[in-house]
Image (tube, rainbow, N blue to C red):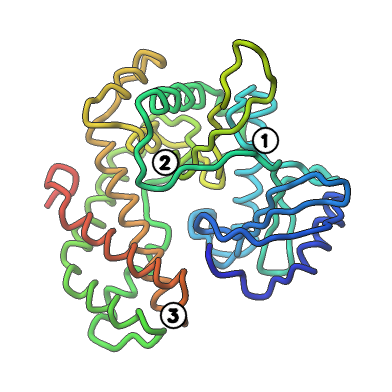
Amino acid sequence: MRDRPTGVTEQDLARALADGWGIRAAALRYAPVGGGSYHWLVRDEQGERWFVTVDDLDDKGWPGRTRPAVFEGLRAAMDAALALRREAALGFVAAPVPARDGETVRPLGARHAVTVFPFLRGAPGRWGEALSVPERGELVAMLAALHRADPAAVRLPRREIGVSWRSDLETALGELDQPWIGGPFAEPARMLLAGTAGQVRQRLETLDRWARDTAAAETVITHGEPHPGNVMRAPPASAGPSQPLTEMMLIDWDTVALAPPERDLWLVASETGDELRRYTELTGRPVDVTALELYRLRWAMDDISCFLRGLRAQHRRTADAEHAWQALKLSVAQITQQGSGATGS
């Protein structure tokens, strides 16, 4: 996030780190990276660095609709990431550091939650950037290992096929005949949705049919967002003559859940199909190509619901609001261009 969270000061954060993790911050620097969470780079009094994430419990649609439900959902996800790294020995999982009481996530006031991660040297990719062929191969191998992990080892819900802020999207569709006054991008968002409302409703119906048809489908542990922006190249944990200069890590595990494997695979498949064939070789599991396209549709519809919710609410012309408006236009364009095979139109 480019904008800082409302109601959280660096003094609040420093106190939470000291109380929860025993980290006495000598320096905190806000890092305007990623989307959906707020991040700080922290250096403690001993010179050790940490990566700290703060989440707004009012702005996470997938774990639940109340602050307690969202908090427990985030904690379950972070607990799962920690178990996958420690107990399933998946070294590519960038897991959180437990607090002194053993909890992976702690409250930060009534509205926010804080999580601490080891500082990883290196840099993630960017959403939309293409990974190299070797990198895609390595990512497929990582996902195959993740999908082979025992679901009983983690306390995770099944992630149903749905849209995070479905009720907000339905409300927006029902209020297209009146002005939206939330801020500078509210009316442009209304006009954009008004011009594509029929297609948006059709796509929602498609997802509803798909959810009914796949209710009993096999599930595995999925990351949920294994795109280049959540792939980091970092120096290896141990050095040696045969050790590669970097190793690939998967970050941002807050959407980890039980789901069909295609929830992850649509993000790594290229037009050649090589990645899907390799995945089947590694797991013995065939890939449902139709499900790949439907998960692509679900992603776009989820983004539409999230961005519309933000742009209908009170907002100013900020970097995050500008990003939401541009991303909304791209997502709407995507669902209007998708073929009839995935949409049922």
Q: What residue sits 41% from the left and 84% below the top?
A: 182
Residue 317 disc label? 3
First reached walking from the N terminus: tag 3 or tag 1: 1
Front: mark 3 or 2: 3
Residue type, numbered disc 1:
Leu
Q: Residues within 10 Å of mark 3 (few under 14, many from 20)?
A: few
Q: Nearer the viewer, residue 188 or 82?
A: 188
Please indicate whether residue 344 sits to the left or right of residue 71 in the image.
left
Task: Measure the C-alpha gap from mark 3 to mark 1.
Answer: 38 Å
From the top left corner, tell me how far across and down residue 15 is, in percent. Answer: 83, 63
Residue type, numbered disc 3:
Arg
From the top left corner, tell me how far across and down residue 26 is, in percent. Answer: 83, 57
Where is mark 1, residue-wise? 82
From the top left corner, tell me how far across and down residue 253 is, in percent. Answer: 56, 42
Instruction: Report which quarter residue 129 is drawn in.
Output: top left
User: How many discs mark residues in the rendered view?
Assistant: 3
The correct choice, above or below, for 104 with respect to 217 in the image is: below
The correct choice, above or below, for 140 with respect to 210 in the image is: above
Where is mark 2, residue-wise? 227
Residue type, numbered disc 2:
His
First reached walking from the N terminus: tag 2 or tag 1: 1
Q: Are marks 3 and 1 in contact (CB under 8 Å)?
A: no
Task: Measure the C-alpha gap from mark 2 to mark 1.
Answer: 20 Å
Q: Nearer the viewer, residue 124 or 220?
A: 124
Instruction: Report which quarter residue 310 is drawn in.
Output: bottom left
